[in-house]
Amino acid sequence: MNVTDGRAITQPHEQAFDVVIVGSGPAGAAVARQLARAGAKVAVVEEGPYVEPAACPESGFQAMAKLYRDLGGVLAMGNAPMPVLQGRAVGGSSVINGAISWRMPRDVHAEWVAKDPPLADALPWETIEATLDDIERDLNIAPTPPDIAGRRNLLMGEGADTLGLEHRPISRNVRGCRGLSRCLQGCPEGHKLSMDQSYLPDAVEHGAVIFSSTTARRVEVEDGTAQGIEAISAAGAKVRLTATRAVVLAASAVQTPALLIKSGLGHGPVGRHFQCHPGVSMAGRFREPAPVWIGATQGHEVIGLRHEGLKFEVLGYDVSILGTRLKTVGRELARDFGDAARWVNWGAAIRAQGEGIVKAGRRGASVRFSLTPDDLSKVRRGVRVLGELMLAAGAELVTPGVYGWHEKVTDRSVMARFEEEGPLDGKAYTMAMTHLFGTCRMSSQPGQGVVRPDFRHHTVDRLYVADSSVFPSNLGVNPQSTILALATMCARRIAA
Amino acid sequence: MSWTSFERRWRDALLAAMIPAEGGRPGISEVEQGAFWELYREAAPPVLRLGLRASVWALTWSAVPLAGRPFHRLSPEKKDRFLNRRAASRLYLVRQLVMTLKLVGCFLWLSDDDVRARVMKPAPNADKTDKTDRTDPTDRSDRTL
Ligand SMILES: Cc1cc2nc3c(=O)[nH]c(=O)nc-3n(C[C@H](O)[C@H](O)[C@H](O)COP(=O)(O)OP(=O)(O)OC[C@H]3O[C@@H](n4cnc5c(N)ncnc54)[C@H](O)[C@@H]3O)c2cc1C
Ligand code: SF4
């Protein structure tokens, strides 16, 4: 794919477009593709580099250094401090995500409409459904076939059957996947249809220009109208891109509010109402090998408790990350690595009710987020179910990794007691977040939201927000497909 | 800010104890570290750098009241026991210091190709149901949108 590499932009650069988009993740890519196909002259500005599949490293550390924001080291502070993982590359987090593709749940749409009825007309369910159908076709979204799933994915199904929990193979946006289990390091063979392998090349074919390694620093506004953006190339040159039709922010639910604040547009609820799906994981040792590095990265899920705000997924990643999930140190850790092929990791994603805040500082965006007591109860239930699932699937032991409770559990009845005995202190758990929402909420009421139901900023003309910052709430399911669908609808509004 | 030679010694002693040689696999102290620390310097965000440095100082010197000597002067057995006790500390911050060290240790150790090959060795009686093909790249010519 042809990109303009900011590392080579050494002189000040100015260029005019119809539409300038900040961020090339699912939101930015969907807008770029839709508008480029409609004939608009589109620019996409992306802070991260363009990395070809073959250049995606296998080592977790090298991959995180190359493709993740701050090496995955951005911490959300609060009652359960946890890393906020985000991609930083052409294709955004889709380059390093698990390729799990969920349709937007109808009940979540209904919740949004119940809270803000004008959303029913602005985001009609039938249009969302039809857009999701297109996305599923474009991105070859289909359930993971058993022959590439790998043992650790199939085991989850066996555990869920024993517990009587609904489960299924995960639907993923891949083509020709060989189960290399490297989605989180970037698929080295381009089988994952991340944005750099799908929507962005299509946008470029239709004339879009992608500026990689170029950071937007400010939205330029004159007389209440967005004029374009001011950016800086990785080589240090000033880049000014003007937009005659729209400036679209799609830099993620953390970076978009930060950019608005830095642009002097931080009034109203910008950065507030941050929501997420905190994830908690558990390692279990099986009698048989089921290596984390073989099989579809994330190929199976338990969905029977989604109504409670809990969803369980098989995890797959580099063995270095597995090491951090083993609960031992020193000699015991070194010994555990001798058995690495028998250690399996599964995770629970929590639909948390807690709300946080994103702020912009000199060193970038910062996040504060705390779990509510109800969220902590869900975390605790999630840990219990994870342990029971693993033991039911044949694990010889599980390591809950919760401070103050058993280090190793071999018996399901012990694990079942966790829901009463487990601590309700967030700091006792190890969690991480990868799904982020809500910091530039969409609302029909100017005081309640940052953008209108048609994605337009409430007070600045020609300024749009297209990423999951506009979501009125979190989803309880993996958000990529919903982000793609809503961003596509945003683009249609701009084109209209 | 780069490491002083003292700090490097303390850091290396802690990391070596985090993943020692075991079962024919080399320990952290036996792997080549130059390329790792170069990339770390380029890529690690301030919070991680600060965290690792805090971890090195705190764990090295808290060993004096708790184990009688600074960490790097302890015997291998005492080092192991000390790390295990700190990892299970009542104090969240202390547990996090150990976790930061462990994160960096895992990244460092598993950046080494020989270590990776030994840890990810084909499992004996490997997975019968797994038909993942690791040798024959799939034809991608059908990948159009
Ligand atoms: C490890 C991981 C696994 C995940 N797994 C899944 C999964 O399996 N399924 C799923 O549905 N979701 C998954 N997600 C979440 C999903 O990937 C994200 O929700 C989605 O990518 C968000 O899309 P986005 O376009 O809003 O933001 P992003 O994808 O984060 O893209 C934003 C882009 O904007 C760029 N940017 C930010 N600020 C600027 C600036 N000032 N100037 C220029 N560019 C800027 C960033 O570098 C980034 O590339 C995962 C996320 C992570 C981190
Ligand atoms: S599981 Fe492996 S082959 Fe499949 S998409 Fe992910 S990295 Fe690529």
Image (cartoon, coloured by chain):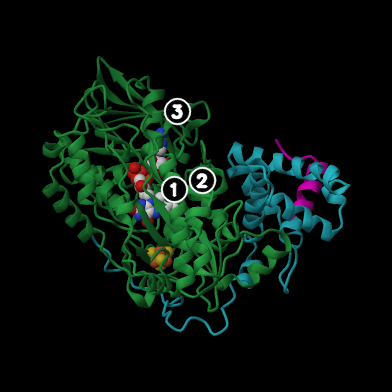
Chain colours: A green, B cyan
Q: Which residue is mark 1?
A: A377
- Label 3 packing within 10 angstroms: few (<14), some (14-19), many (20+): many
User: Dot 3 lies on which element?
Assistant: strand
Whether A241 is drawn above or below A305: the answer is above
Q: Which residue is mark 2?
A: A424
Chain letter, disc 3 residue:
A
- Label 2 packing within 10 angstroms: few (<14), some (14-19), many (20+): some
- Answer whether labels 2 and 1 touch (C-beta < 8 Å): yes
Looking at the rendered structure, whether the residues under marks 1 and 3 are on a common chain is answered as yes
The disc, 2 or 1, on the residue closer to the chain's N-terminal end is: 1
Task: Tell whether A347 sits left or right of B145.
Answer: right
User: Can residue A71 be seen by looking at this rendering?
Assistant: yes
How many angstroms separate mark 1 from mark 3 (CA)?
28 Å
Q: Residue at coordinates 56% horizontally, 70% vertically from top-left?
A: A410
Res A359 label: 3
- Answer whether labels 1 and 3 touch (C-beta < 8 Å): no
Res A329 → quadrant: bottom right
User: Can residue A3 be seen by looking at this rendering?
Assistant: no
- Magenta region: B1-15
Q: Residue at coordinates 41% horizontally, 80% vertically from top-left?
A: B131
The disc, 2 or 3, on the residue closer to the chain's N-terminal end is: 3
How many angstroms separate mark 2 from mark 1 (CA)?
7 Å
**Which is more foreground, mark 2 or mark 3?**
2
Q: Amino acid at mark 1?
A: Ser
The disc, 1 or 3, on the residue closer to the chain's N-terminal end is: 3
Task: Tell whether A69 sits left or right of A207.
Answer: right
Looking at the rendered structure, whether the residues under marks 2 and 1 are on a common chain is answered as yes
Q: Amino acid at mark 3?
A: Lys
